[in-house]
Image: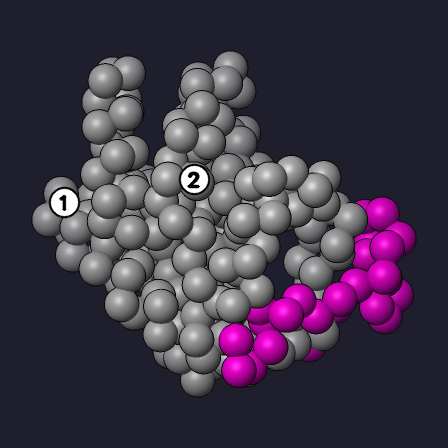
Amino acid sequence: MGAPGAGKGTHGDIIAVKHSIPHISTGDIFRENIKNGTELGSKAKGYMDKGLLVPDDLVVDLVVDRLKQADCADGYVLDGFPRTIPQAEALDAALEAAGGKIDYAINIDVPDGTIIERMACRRVCPNCGAIYHTIAAPPRKEGICDKCGTALILRDDDRPETVKKRLAVYHEQTEPLISYYSGRGILSTVDGTKGSIDDISASIEQIFR
């Protein structure tokens, strides 16, 4: 959990690799659908480009279906879902019906000002979805994806004016999840500005221990 640009994707990847579980990002699902020109992708793009959340009914069934796949049998890390209380309630109900549950909710806390600065430096591969930062995590060749050689872009929803809108939406609709998961006794918060990516990752691993 965390605001846009807090590091959810980065640490989701790290957790997935360390624990050999899939990293499930609704953003990746949406981008794949956008790239493939599906109806869902077109609807999702309209919201994402405006810095708004994709409505619950476009994501809940898709994510729950994903969790039923064989590679999720031993666990998974969710990145960017749930984003609203109704999504969290729908997820809990679906998992309970299947005999599962969420074990940990990790909140990566980063101030808004830092988020805006970070996002302006973020570059994304439109082909494979890899994420870079021009200062903290640049590609080996400037402007080119390390993984597939595609030219990197600054996404419309990473521009400062859109990020401010995204943060406003986050505080209104997603931040209440902090209380939601705290009330269930599974929430832990880490400082997303304290130290390097490795330092923050170590703090998250300490929670799992």
User: What numbered label is drawn on residue 59?
Assistant: 2
Q: Quadrant of the C terminus?
A: top left
Tell me the number on the disc at residue 27. Answer: none
What secondary structure is the magenta-colored segment mainly? loop
In front: 192, or 31? 31
Report the quarter where the N terminus lies: bottom left
- From which residue to which does the magenta span run? 135-162
Q: Quadrant of residue 38?
A: top right
Question: In this view of the protein, which residue sits in the foreground, 106 or 35?
Answer: 35
Picture residue at 47% right of the left edge, 55% below the top = 8
Q: Secondary structure at mark 1?
A: loop
Residue farthest along the left direction in this orientation: 183
Q: Look at label 2 and name its amino acid.
A: Val
Q: Residue 183: horizontal and vertical position, in percent?
A: 10, 49
Q: Amino acid at mark 1?
A: Gly
Q: Which residue does the numbered mark 1 point to in the structure image?
A: 185
Identify which residue, 180 or 52, lies in the foreground: 52
Spatial distance from mark 1 to mark 2, Cα to Cα? 25 Å
